[in-house]
C-alpha cells in the first residue's frame, strides 16, 4: 500500500501550451529528492481535461520512465466513457504505471449502479491496481460510501481518493471496506485530520509546491504524532487555501513557475493566474518557506 504524500503532478508546458518533457523530467527528479511518496501523472492537476489521448498517454509513459522505479507512479485514467477509461487504463499498464486513479464519470451523472458497473468493467478488463476517485464538486456525481464498499470487493480495486472534505466519510468507508483498503484524502485543507483518523495519506495539490513539508506532515499524522503534524501544517495552511484561489491547477502552476521549476504554460480554457492574486499566493509560499 502506498502511504503518505502522493503528489498530483502539474504538467509543464511552454508558452504555446505544448508539453515540456525536459521540465517534466526535472520535476520528477525534484520530487524524488524531496521525499514525495508517489506521483499521479495526468490527474486533474495535470490538466487531464485539456490533453488529447496521445498526449495523455505520452505524459504517463514519460513520468514512469523518468521515475525509473525510484518512486511509484499512479496514472490518471478516468473518463466519462467506460470504454475510454478502459483504453487509458490499459495503456497506463503497458507504460509501466504502478496503479491507476479513476475519477467518477463526469457530466453524465450516472446512478450508483452505473458507477458500480463502470468500475466492474474496468476491473475486469485491466489487471492493474485501481484507486477510485470521488470528487463531486468537479464531476456532479457523488460516489456514496456504500457504493465504494461495494466496488471495493472487485478484483484490482485497492483504494479510494475521497475529495469531498467530509471527515465523517472516512470511518464509514473504512467500516465498509476493511483495513487493507487504502483511503486517501483528496482535500489538502483537511488531510492532516483525515490521516489522524486513520487515512493512508493524501493525493495532494499542495505537495507540488512544498513537497518535503507535506510528506513530513502526513507521515507525522499517519503515525499519530499529532503535535508535530499540526506544527508543520500551520506552515502549509496558506497554500491549502490560496492554491485554490482560482480553479485548480491555475494557482499551483503559477506557484511552481514562481519557484523556477516550470514555464508559464497552461491550456485553454484555463488561463494564467490573475495578477490580483499574485501577492496572496506568494504570501502562502513564504509561510511555507519555499521562496
Image: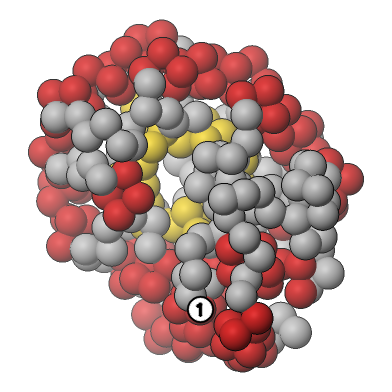
Q: Residues within 10 Å of mark 1 (few under 14, many from 20)?
A: many
Check the image and report above or below for 8 versus 285: above
- Horizontally, residue 218 falls left or right of residue 18, namely left
Q: How is the image coloured?
A: secondary structure
Residue for point 62% across, 49% down: 268
User: Looking at the picture, does residue 265 appear above or below residue 25?
Assistant: below
In the image, 155 versus 285, the foreground residue is 285
Disc 1 target residue = 242
Q: Answer left or right for 131 relative to 181.
A: right
In the picture provided, is 200 more to the left or to the right than 108?
right
Q: Quadrant of residue 83?
A: top left
Q: How many discs appear?
A: 1
Query: Residue 22 lies in what quarter of the image?
Result: top right
Q: Position of residue 114 (x, y in %)?
A: 19, 23
x and y, in percent, of residue 132 in the image? 35, 36
Q: Residue furthest top?
A: 125
Could you tell me if residue 217 is visible in this image? no
Q: Is residue 70 above or below residue 274?
A: above
Residue nearer the viewer, 103 or 55: 55
Q: Secondary structure at mark 1?
A: helix
Q: Quadrant of the C terminus?
A: bottom right
Residue 72: percent from left, percent from top: 62, 40
Q: What residue lies at 71% left-to-right and 81% top-to-bottom?
A: 290
Query: Where the N terminus falls, by quadrant?
Result: top left
Residue 90 appears at what percent x and percent y?
54, 15
The image shows residue 262, relative to residue 133, as above or below, that is below
Q: Residue at x 53, y 21 (%)?
A: 88
Residue furthest right as drawn = 22
Q: Is residue 261 visible?
A: yes
Report the front residue among 239 and 227: 239
- At a point 42% along the width and 28% down the height, the residue shown is 79
Amino acid at each position: 500500500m502506498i502511504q503518505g504524500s502522493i503528489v498530483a503532478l502539474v504538467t509543464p508546458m511552454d508558452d504555446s501550451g505544448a508539453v515540456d518533457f525536459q521540465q517534466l523530467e526535472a520535476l520528477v527528479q525534484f520530487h524524488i529528492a524531496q521525499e514525495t511518496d508517489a506521483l499521479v501523472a495526468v490527474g486533474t492537476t495535470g490538466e487531464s481535461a485539456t490533453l488529447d489521448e496521445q498526449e495523455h498517454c505520452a505524459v504517463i509513459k514519460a513520468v514512469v520512465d523518468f521515475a525509473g522505479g525510484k518512486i511509484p507512479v499512479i496514472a490518471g485514467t478516468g473518463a466519462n466513457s467506460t470504454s475510454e477509461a478502459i483504453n487509458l487504463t490499459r495503456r497506463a499498464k503497458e507504460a509501466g504505471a504502478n496503479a491507476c486513479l479513476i475519477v467518477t464519470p463526469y457530466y453524465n451523472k450516472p446512478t450508483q449502479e452505473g458507477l458500480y458497473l463502470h468500475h466492474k468493467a474496468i476491473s475486469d478488463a485491466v489487471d492493474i491496481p485501481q484507486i477510485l476517485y470521488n470528487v463531486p464538486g468537479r464531476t456532479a456525481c457523488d460516489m456514496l460510501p456504500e457504493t465504494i464498499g461495494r466496488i471495493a470487493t472487485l478484483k484490482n480495486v485497492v483504494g479510494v481518493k475521497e475529495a469531498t472534505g467530509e471527515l465523517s466519510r472516512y470511518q464509514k468507508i473504512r467500516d465498509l471496506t476493511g483495513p487493507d483498503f487504502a483511503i486517501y484524502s483528496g482535500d489538502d485543507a483537511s488531510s492532516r485530520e483525515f490521516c489522524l483518523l486513520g487515512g493512508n495519506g493524501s493525493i495532494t495539490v499542495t505537495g507540488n509546491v512544498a513537497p518535503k513539508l507535506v510528506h513530513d506532515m502526513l507521515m507525522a499524522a499517519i503515525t499519530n504524532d499529532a503535535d508535530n503534524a499540526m506544527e508543520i501544517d500551520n506552515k502549509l495552511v496558506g497554500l491549502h487555501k490560496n492554491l485554490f484561489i482560482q480553479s485548480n491547477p491555475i494557482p499551483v502552476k503559477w506557484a511552481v513557475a514562481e519557484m523556477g521549476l516550470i514555464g508559464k504554460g497552461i491550456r485553454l480554457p484555463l488561463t494564467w493566474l490573475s495578477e490580483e492574486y499574485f501577492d496572496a499566493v506568494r504570501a502562502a509560499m513564504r509561510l511555507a518557506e519555499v521562496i
